[in-house]
Image: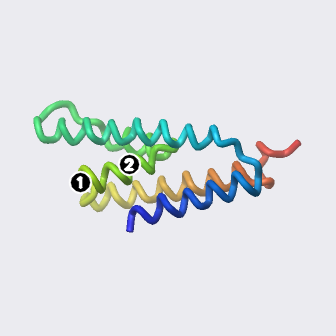
Amino acid sequence: MPYLSILMFAAVFGGAVLAWDIPLSLGVLYLVASCACFALYAMDKAAARSGGYRTPERTLLLLGLGCGWPGAVLAQQWLRHKSSKRPFQVAFWVTVACNAAAFVYLCSPLSFMRMP
């Protein structure tokens, strides 16, 4: 089910590229942020196991909000990290919804950023 969110966003992103002439470089931003987010989740998982310094949940949520959420979804599924903490999951999916809504608005012709 979480993978569906990535597929749906990819479809929305593709539609935005075709309909609103969004640069593909924005996809590179999502890819880089997702890789960074996945790496941070992996480091936090390793720290949780070894008793090392943990990444604050706020940091994980902010990086997800800043376009890294697809990587976070993959990390949560593949690494089984933060996937069962209910309060974190609620906050995480709120940030995913906020990022997706901001993406659609900022890329749409209605956005103040797209006005001539």
Left or right of residue 1: residue 32: right
**Mark 2 belongs to which amino acid?**
Ala
Q: How is the image coloured?
A: rainbow
Question: Residue at image x 62%, y 54%?
Answer: 13
Residue in the foreground of this view, choosing between 36 and 47: 36
Which residue matches tag 2?
72
The residue most toward the bottom is 1
| First along the sequence among labels 2 and 1 | 2
Name the mark on residue 80.
1
Residue 43 percent across, percent down from the top left: 25, 35
Residue 69 percent across, percent down from the top left: 45, 49
Question: Residue at image x 30%, y 42%?
Answer: 41
Question: Residue at image x 32%, y 49%?
Answer: 75
Residue 67 percent across, percent down from the top left: 51, 44
Q: How many marks?
A: 2
Left or right of residue 17: residue 97: left
The residue most toward the left is 50
